[in-house]
Amino acid sequence: MPFISKIQRQSDYSLFPSSCPIVIDNGASYFRLGWAGETDPRIIFRNIVQRPRLKTTGETVTIVGDHDPALMKYFDCTRSGPRSAFESNVVFQFEIMEYILDFGFDRLGADQAEIDHPVLITECACNPVQSRSKMAELLFESYGVPSVAFGVDAAFSYKYNQQLGVCNKDGLVISTGFSTSHAIPFVNGEPVYEACCRTNVGGYHVTDYLKQLLSLKYPHHMSRLTWEKVEDLKMEHCYIAPDYLSEARLFQKGTKEAEEKTKCWQLPWTPSPTEEPPSEEEIARKAALKEKQGQRLREMAEAKRTSRINELENECKGLEFLLHQLKHVKDSDIPSFLSETGYVSKQEIEAALVKVTQSLRKAKGEQADTEEKTDPTSTEKYSMVDIPDNMLTPEQLKEKRKQVFIKTTSEARQRAKQKRLEEELERERQNKQDEEKRLENPELYREQLRTKHRELSEKVEQRKRLKTNGGHTNGNNNGTGGVGRGERLNAAQKERMRLLTTAAFDRGKGEDTFGIKDEDWQLYKLMSKDNDDDDEGPDEDEAELVRMSARLKEIDPTFLPKLESVSSSAEVPRLRPLTKEDFQIVLGVERFRCPEILFNPNLVGIDQAGLDEMAGVSMRRLPTRGQSVDERITNSILMTGGSCLFPGMAERLEAGIRMIRPCGTPIQVVRASDPILDAWRGAAAYAAAMQFPQQTFTRMDYYEKGEDWLRGYQMRYTI
């Protein structure tokens, strides 16, 4: 609605005399307010109240009706949601109703303490007396209105369409509101409330059901499925199916007709940027830059190597010069001479020279001697190794054992060094052979390498499974591979367990003599976990598998070792880029499934009658029945309310009523000229009639007769 300033609203309000009634269509969804005799209401807003807090000050404010979503960023709405004064189309929260009336009268332009105009307000059929009494008390006590009149919205809509010639004097109005649906028969132009029927299903339940279905179908887009947006989707795409089961089978089969009826709502979506392959110029530029960086690193490494060689050469020359000077120094003067150099003996200088010489040769890249040089002092170091034990004293025996340990350790270190050198030479030779094979036939070499990698990978996986589960099923033929712990042990582990068990068993027999003999201490070596052959160092097959994987990565950019090693039953999920289809809300069977609850409320767990059954119930409740009356009523069935705007509603309602009526009964179902505003327009036309003041309940009657007088109050619509 266009914006009207407060001064203009007050000016318009003052133009109407005090005898002009104010007409209020108090619906559970929308609140409509205007002047009697006009064709459209002045004020229309959502019949809800919200009390959020300002984020800046924390002050609570009251927001009535619709609100701009852009302004809600200034409020904290986490503790207060939209609240309605209605419960099943009956007003029961009059504190909220007072906020709504304040806002409505203010928007109408009323700036006085009291409202000096009669008020005609709509209510539902068979409204409880307590709700009507509280509404009258609110209008009389808080606003000081001179008189009040109550009327049923569906009856006003029927009378308004009767004046337009849409329906007859005798007929049936079916009103599908926001939270309830009513069926009210009319006889001789007056509603028969004794025969009316109500079902607690309306447009709210249709929207809520559609929101639930879409939220379950698209859980990743729940933030997009707001109540307002789902309401728009309902009014734009939903329809009533002529036959629900046939329509459901149509979508189940996925025919072309079902595809044509399927609608799609495209959410905002930005395609991910596509990575274009680099051009030849870009590749050449990156290669040149990489080569430049590599050349710079090589120059830095060469400069560092040259500096290191110079330092080692100077150190080597200094040590040689020091040894040369020692030749001309007397033995008695050697300690005083070496005290200034930092060395203790001549042997220490020679050892330092040997170490510096080796480092210098390594820095220059010269091949080290594979044959170990014979240390001239080794015979002096290990002089007691070859002497028998019976010829040595106890102190000499200790020294001999020490020399044996040192000699054994040194020899083992030399053997390990020689083994590493041989392995490195073998790897270089194998890499050279592989490179020659690759250059001869790259495709064949790559295929053979992938085949070997696959076979070796299966072998390693099989070995891991056998190590974990064992080679047999422990007597159980269940095929699961689950075995006992003993069957997962290898031979060395089983022997260790036997020795541990034997040692523990022998310990409890007689005197504990373990440790007296030297053979007893050899058991510790056998019991140690380090004695297991299965746990010594890395597996050769696994090392070879790692080498082949690295080689395949170099020659085949499409190689994915993790995906090849995983079994086909446990595939690794691949993340794909989001597409346009991922941001689409598809409405298929939901289009007719949600409005179907108006005819079958049991779809949402409400055990009540549908719209077509309500018509039959109302006609059976008529106090004066006859074939002629029934035919006149079924010949003028009026649909009103927002939910009757669904396509196919009239046809489905006519087919349902025809199923419960005798064959040949004339049935005509029509829709109101404006199902949403006809109730207010009918009330405005009724309030403009000359006989309207006789139908009101004045403030004097309220003070003299009290609220109980409203129990027998009933408006006559034929005036």
Image: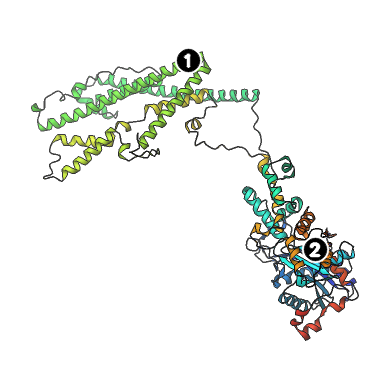
Real-space Cα distance between discs 2 and 1? 86 Å
Circle 2 crowding by C-alpha within 10 Å: few under 14, some 14–19, many from 20 = some
The quarter in which the C terminus is drawn is bottom right
322 or 285, which is in the foreground? 285
**Foreground disc of the pair 2, 1:** 2
Query: Circle 1 — which element?
Result: helix
Residue bearing mark 1 = 437
Whole-percent x and y of residue 422? Answer: 35, 20
Residue at 50% from the left image edge and 20% from the top image edge = 447
Going by the image, does 306 lie left or right of 188?
Answer: left
Query: Circle 2 — which element?
Result: strand
Going by the image, does 200 lie left or right of 372?
Answer: right
The quarter in which the N terminus is drawn is bottom right
Quarter occupied by residue 365: top left
Q: Is residue 635 above or below residue 550?
A: below
Residues under numbered marks 2 and 1 in contact, where contact means CB atoms less than 8 Å apart: no
679 or 493, which is in the foreground? 679
Total numbered labels placed on residues in the image: 2
Report if residue 299 is visible in the image. no
Residue at the extreme bottom: 704
14 or 327, which is in the foreground? 14
Residue bearing mark 2 = 44
- Dot 2 amino acid type: Ile
593 or 400, which is in the foreground? 593
Going by the image, does 324 lie left or right of 611?
Answer: left
Report if residue 149 is visible in the image. yes
- Dot 1 amino acid type: Lys
Whole-percent x and y of residue 606? Answer: 65, 61
Whole-percent x and y of residue 542? Answer: 40, 29
- Mark 2 and mark 1 lie on one chain; the one further toward the N terminus is 2
Of the numbered discs in the image, which one, if any, rests on residue 573?
none
Whole-percent x and y of residue 571? Answer: 51, 36
